[in-house]
Image (cartoon, helix red, strand yellow):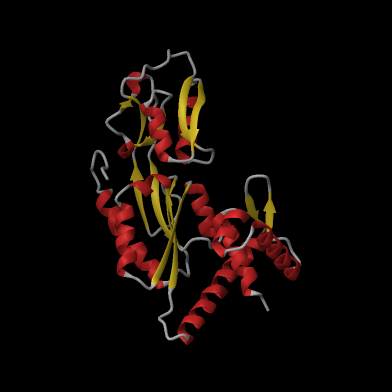
Amino acid sequence: MFDLDLLRSFVSVVDAGGFTRAGERVNRSQSTVSQQIRRLEEDIGKPLLRRDRRTIHLTEAGETLLGYARRLLEIADEARQSLGGEAPATTVRLGIPEDFAVTSLTGVIADFARARPSVRLEVRCDLSVRLREGLARGQFDAVLAKREPDSGPALGAWPERLVWLAGKTAALPARGAPLPLVAFMPGCLYRDRAIRALDAIGRPWRIAYESPNLSGVQAAVAGGLGIALLEARIAGTDHRVLGPEDGMPRVPSTELALDLRPDAPEAAQALGRTILTFCDEKFAPNREQIAF
């Protein structure tokens, strides 16, 4: 028999990305949560998490248990609510790229949540590579993430147009000098595309500024700290687009894709249809620049 209290702490550690934030979710101290995970590992007889100084990672046993743990907790919650005479709540976990958190998609998601009061919506913003990994582990019910074009089946997929952005009045370095890059953290598809494109033409570069969030990248570019490769809709009034005439290589499009967990609940499927409609409208074909 699994101890549901231990399972709840395990899921919280995975979702929160650490023991301290997990303790805040379940109203326990970091040391208590850590002890609960050790007890669960002792009951199972296998390690569930690999720990380093900054992050935690699921072991193979942890990945296997995570999906079952979510289902057991959902069933327990449904049973408790049904016995109490309340309509069972459904938790829907959505992952979206950080730059989408500041667009009108946030309003669409909020409208969906208000229209379905029995749904507990949990949204996380992160790098696309982490979102896709989380979907594979059962951490999300639906994920909207960037990827290479034609990377496989998806509920919906839309092309993205990548452009080089500099500050409105920023001076560019000489052609032979290293190009200062402003980028998201390692693992970002845009960052990888930028580096590969510059290496392909033999243009030296250096990372001048890196940030985990879009606002930091935008501010660094606007302030003249460097050049960034971003989706065209990100360009603001304090940015300018660079092209071949500035010595910048053309970069192929990336793709935005919407995926659902195979056994996602009906509420997650409904949210997927809502996001699908939103993206179909915003990424209309033949539109030169996507504006949110």
Where residue 248 appears, x then y in whole percent? 39, 23
- Which image quadrant: the C terminus? top left
78 displayed left or right of 285: right
The quarter in which the N terminus is drawn is bottom right
Q: Is residue 123 toward the left or the right of residue 237 in the image? A: right
Foreground residue among 132 and 148:
132
Q: Is residue 201 shown to the viewer in this render?
A: no
Please name whichever residue, 163 or 148, is drawn nearer the observer in this view of the structure.
163
Left or right of 82 on screen, residue 43:
right
Determine the residue positioned at 69% across, 58% down: 31
How far from the left and from the top, in percent, is residue 197?
46, 29
Residue at 55 percent of width and 56 percent of height: 16
Q: Is residue 3 above or below residue 187?
A: below
Residue occupying image coordinates x 59% and y 71%: 68
Residue at x 34%, y 45% (from the top left corner)? 159
Give the vertical position of 125 relative to 288 (above or below): below
